[in-house]
Image (cartoon, rainbow, N blue to C red):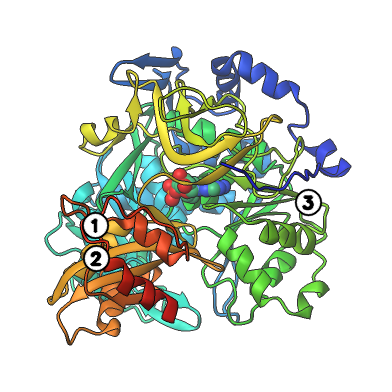
Amino acid sequence: MKQDFSRKVYWPSKKVSREAWVNRESVYVAAERNPLKFWEGQAENLAWFKKWRKVFVQGPNGFKWFVGGKLNMSYNCLERNISAGLGNKVALRWIPEPKNEKIVELSYRELLEKTNRFANALRRLGVKKGDVVGIYLPMIPEAVISMLACARIGAVHIVIFSAFASDGLNQRLKVTRAKVLITSDGYYRKGSKIDLIEKVSAGIEGTNIKKVICVGRQGFGRNRRGWISFEGLLKNESDMCEVEEMDSEDLFFILPESGTGGEFIPIMHTCGGYAVQALTSGRFVFDFHEGDVYWCTGDIGWITGHTYGVYSPLLNGVTSVFYEGALNYPNKERWAEIIEENHVNIFYTSPTAVRMFEQEAGRKIDSFLFKNLKVIATVGEPIDEYAWKWFFEKIGKKKASVLDTYWQTETGGVVISSLPGVGPFRPTFAGRVFPGVKVGILNERGGRTKLNETGKLVMFSPFCPGMMRGVYRDEKRYRRYFAKGMKVYSLDDLAFKCPDGMIKIVGRADDLIKISGHRMSTVEIENAVSSLSGIEECAIVGRSDTLKGTVPVVFVKAKSGITEEQIVRRIVEKVGPIAKPSRVYFVEDLPKTKSGKIVRGILRKLVEGEEAVDVDVLSNPESLAGIRKLIKED
Ligand code: WT7
């Protein structure tokens, strides 16, 4: 395949490079020579109640990191930093969406006190080590307090994105068997008050949820009978709370992700390795230093919000900006104002957000100087060259290091990215493999590809410390990710590598699509559509979109009378507004194989405007004429 990509590379500014934790090639060399020693050295930066006996073990059924080590994440985020003199430093700077509301700052000490109070309250409610606690909260400080409180007592949190519909909440609570749910009466989004009470009432039906704790975000004190007020709970608790000594390999949290089959895959992360990777990658990739003000725009409902919205910045003792609302509300430049007004110097966002900034930017954007920014980075999907350059020139002012960080829910932390003090940065390339991580690109026969040749991206044992350790109660599903006695992990992305070691991610190798950087399964959306009576058949594929990266497009064969609006409404109700399709095509027939399977690959090509498709596989090639016509008419 002929590759078309940018050959231009950029290097860090002298200032960024000089001040960075990592600015030498030798770090890569040493880590490559001995990855275990590298990670072990990084682990020394955490506080351990008991040191590990062995840094890594690999067996035929799995692997472990920092075996025998004991630690606690909340202790490492809070007390460890407070002992180092950061007690009065702002840990969290919360910005509500309504501009007339007050910004809330919590110092490391205040965050510890609140975490302790809430952790005591959870214990009093009977939550014990290993119990699963659901967190269905918007971007408010209570979300961070809840996560840290769970970490403190060894409860396993499962965060559910607050924009998911009640069905999504329900299914996620069911698969993880959560006992307690922490939620809020609602939140603000683009000026409207979004209500969560109804969604929660429906979402907990038929689950194991015994108690609901509700934050009064909207100040109405509205509550359902039997629900407990978050604020009320804190009042009577002590601000001291003993930490649970967690084993390195104890379950830390579960985060259900979309699988290709439309199911939720509850990914499990453990305590020790995850903490080591969160700390180390924050330091290496974002170059966290004591005086930094960092802003990650990712929601806590996704892994980015876990690792780089909460744990990594807190472990590294920086000030983290936490914003409730939409980046372009109430004015298009709100995001830029937040950067400037809060002196943000490290900014982490998504390519979709960058494209939106670029498309909406008027002349006003040039009045922002962004003098402080030293690192600006994206995650979630590939960033195109145009958006990259705009980001670099207009936001980074050609001085900031621009990073395209590649990783997954499964890897827990960044596995491919340039480092801000080392470089180089190359538009549309994720960068080099993180020190201490081994990846390969394999061809169809499982052999190594040549340079510049596209293949499947894999990671080799010892993977990375923050790597998932299982799929909750589904050993088989977990093993499906691996090959060769669990020594090779497939990332399910296509990539190629250039002679300079830079890796370009070409796209997914399966049926997951990225909508605004959020991972969705097309099957999950199909199931929502099929639940509408009168739908005979349905297929969903992703179409590239200049703003969102990919958007779902629906093909249905339906009884007459069904409208596009009904289908869109059903998707929003069942999955959430994020999965809203850009188009619904009513077709007479869907292209099928001889064995009757819908060939989504052909539909995908057609919506992208590709003319040539292989019709030999089809039993009904005539079905394509009507579909082509519909697409052309658009
Ligand atoms: C998938 C993982 C990990 C944080 C958010 C996403 C895609 C992620 C990049 C990037 C190209 C990327 C991959 C990956 N992806 N980062 N920098 N360039 N593609 O986590 O929701 O688990 O999705 O996102 O396809 O496998 P996730």
Instruction: Give the image location of residue 511, x and y in percent.
Output: 35, 51
Sequence-earlier tag: 2 or 1: 2
Residue 253 location (% of width, % of height): 35, 42
Disc 1 residue type (three-letter): Ile
Q: Residue at x 38, y 21 (%)?
A: 64
Residue found at x 55% / y 43%: 505
Q: Quadrant of the N terminus?
A: top right
Cβ atoms under marks 2 and 3 closer than 8 Å: no
Residue 590: which disc? Answer: 2
Q: Residue at x 53, y 37 (%)?
A: 454
Which residue in the protein does label 1 denote? 598
* Three-letter amino acid code at the position of disc 3: Ala
Question: Image quadrant of residue 515?
Answer: bottom left
Label 1 to label 3, Cα distance in Å?
Answer: 47 Å
Q: Which residue is mark 3?
A: 400
Residue closest to the eye, 306 or 231 = 306
Q: Position of residue 346 (x, y in %)?
A: 69, 52
For the residues labelled 2 and 1, say whether their Cβ atoms are less than 8 Å apart: yes
Which of the two marks, 1 or 3, is nearer to us in this view?
A: 1
